[in-house]
Image (cartoon, rainbow, N blue to C red):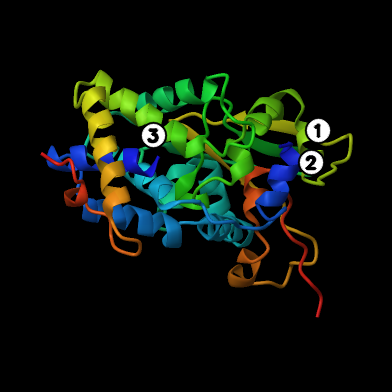
Amino acid sequence: MSLRDLVNVSGGSGGDTPVFTAPWQAEIFAMVLALHDRGLFTWPEWADALSLELKKTDARDDASDYYQRWLKALESLITTKNITLKADIDQLTLAWQRAALATPHGQPIRLENDPDRV
Amino acid sequence: MAARVRALETILTQKGLIDPLAIDAIVETYETKVGPRNGAKVVAKAWSDPEFSEWLKRDATAAIASLGFTGRQGEHMQAVFNTADTHNLVVCTLCSCYPWSVLGLPPVWYKSPPYRSKAVIDPRGVLAEFDLFLPESTKIRVWDSTSELRYLVVPLRPEGSDGLGEEQLVNLVTRNSMIGTGLALTPVRK
């Protein structure tokens, strides 16, 4: 996607489009702000972590993976700081995925719905 | 992606590091309360009030905070004023630092690699993508934001806006004009 296309997507010169395209993007954004408020990391620390993710060569030109990079940057920050282990995140991600599959459409997904829950 | 974010949220909540209610409140604030209208108020005030304009030039962080807009990350603000011969353009080549407190969250193009990489090397080419063509004699100054210092462009007050009050002026200040990829709108004559 060219810069011109991206400008048009954002409603041209003055327009506004929704800032988040999916709820999880808003959640990851808010989590980073909340953790910073708590003093878990400084803002320059965060900017460094994010910039490292954005610099990776597979970053998409249309920035559609922008909040995905936020997620990766936050994961790397909190695992480096030993707040949690990557393995724990992986495991819980699978649990949430199983819970989502086991939840009837239209009902809120809850971790308790994971059939393999121990 | 959603499952992974939920997993993180679950872990951080269990550890007592985040409160789901606070997360919701932050989302709500950024989706509804913070946006380019804040910045437009700052610009309209600077256009109408020479004293405020001076203050904004000297200490943008304090002048902007006086209107109730403060950054959460303790970042400093600098206002860069367009003049007849200099046009200012803001970018963040490193990541996408952006003056959230006055402009809300950045538009998609601001975060994109093409904008971030081209703005410094070829600002005129970038402005052309926004259909903004400035006279050859106009100097373009590019400001690269950092996590500690963020910029707000104060566009030139448009011609024909002489009799307008602050509230009407606010409507002429577009988001892009405060990043430098646009100009303030010209008032429609009635």
Instruction: Inspect this view and state whether residue B155 appears.
Output: no
- Residue A104 falls in which quadrant of the image? bottom left
Q: In the displayed structure, does residue B53 sit left or right of residue A96?
A: right
Q: In the displayed structure, does residue B182 sit left or right of residue A41?
A: right
Q: Residue at x 53, y 21 (%)?
A: A55
Disc 3 with disc 2 on a shared chain = no
How crowded is the residue under tag 2: few (<14 C-alpha within 10 Å), some, or many (20+)? Answer: some
Amino acid of disc 1: Gly
Decide: marks 2, 1 in contact (CB < 8 A)? yes
Mark 3, chain letter? A
Amino acid of disc 3: Leu
Q: Residue furthest bottom?
A: B190
Q: Position of residue B41 (x, y in %)?
A: 54, 60
Q: CA distance from mark 3 to mark 2?
A: 30 Å
Q: Residue at x 57, y 51 (%)?
A: B53
- Circle 1 residue: B125
Q: Which mark is residue B66?
A: none
Q: Residue furthest left?
A: A118
Q: Position of residue B147 (x, y in %)?
A: 44, 30
Q: In the displayed structure, does residue A15 sit left or right of residue B30?
A: right
Amino acid of disc 2: Glu
Q: CA distance from mark 1 to mark 3?
A: 32 Å
Disc 2 with disc 1 on a shared chain = yes
How crowded is the residue under tag 3: few (<14 C-alpha within 10 Å), some, or many (20+)? Answer: many
Q: How many marks?
A: 3
Judging depth in this view, the residue of B152 and A56 nearest the camera is: A56
Q: Residue at x 23, y 31 (%)?
A: A91
